[in-house]
Amino acid sequence: MIGRRFITLLGGAAAAAWPVVARAQQGMPVIGFVSALSPGTSAHLLSAFRRGLAVSGFVEGQNVAIEYRWADGRLVQLAELVADLVRRNVNVIAAPGIGALAAKAATQTIPIVFGISEDPVKLGLVASLAQPGGNLTGINFFVAELVAKRLGLLRELMPAAGRVAVLVNPANVQTASATLSEVEPAARALGLQIQVFNASNIREIDTAYAALVRERPDALFVAPDALFVSRRVQLIGLAARHVLPATYAVREYVEAGGLMSYGTSVADMYRQIGVYTGRILKGGKPADLPVMQATKFELVINLQTARLLDIEIPPPLLARADEVIE
């Protein structure tokens, strides 16, 4: 049985935003940090990244500077953001998420540390996991591989469910395609009908919700995506307003009031990116640093949200949760 711990969320206090740009002092190495997320939703992830840097003795503002670039869910901006970091000739680029592809296209010389859900070999980021062979290395965490497991947990939560809406971002081609290729056979095996809804920006999220509410599905399966994470308060608010049970890929949704999540620990992935970034600043070469694979997965359930939705969590599912929020 997986151990669990209960925590209570206290509302009303927002995390302080980190500065978007850190100016380098004379002789101080500079990290270029590029993310598809927004700074307002990433304070805890940046804290994990900094903890990883500290393993090698690097502390922002003391002996290393960080130039931050945020796409705020607008994936088309990533290439421009990375190009700016390359022009500034930063010492290393940390690129959690899809920004790694833009970084790969922008430079073959500046070291890049990625955190990506798809197979980095198939994406052409590295030659192999054991021997990356170029200027990139990083962490491979799992998303598509967990889709069937997450859908199965949703079925366990709602055994009477028959129809599930799946929300994807078609602009995030790799993740959307991988999610759909896994969710469709998994749904058939579980006897579920699925209907896909697309959203690539804030307005389309509202439009997709309006459409899926008219269809009256039994539950919602939100695909992993930077836009959706950055707009998680909007998504959770819509789910609450329409009394729609929803499952998500990362715990950040559940901490903000979502019902249930299962997936890789994103914070741990950011910490590992920090560790590798620090090693490179110490003289390590990406070609010699094997790609790490995520090993930490977590099931998180929000009991307060379950009560509001009038859902009773089955005791066996509750017992397996790594964390229960009430």
Image (cartoon, rainbow, N blue to C red):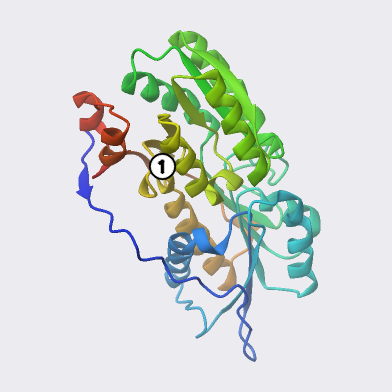
> x and y percent of residue 153 in the render?
37, 24
The C terminus: image quadrant: top left
* Residue at the far bottom in the pictured view: 26
- Along the line of sight, which residue is nearer the eye, 36 or 239? 239
Residue under pointer 1: 295
Asked if one can make out residue 283 in the rendered structure from this viewpoint, the answer is: no
- Along the line of sight, which residue is nearer the eye, 76 or 120? 76
What amino acid is at disc 1? Answer: Thr
Q: Is residue 111 above or below residue 141?
A: below
The N terminus: image quadrant: top left
Residue 37 horizontal side relative to residue 256, left or right: right
Q: Is residue 324 above or below residue 84?
A: above
Decide: few, some or many residues near mark 1? Use Cα within 10 Å; few <14, some 14-19, many ≥20: few
> x and y percent of residue 320 in the render?
25, 32
Residue 198 horizontal side relative to residue 300, left or right: right
Q: Residue at x 64, y 46 (%)?
A: 202
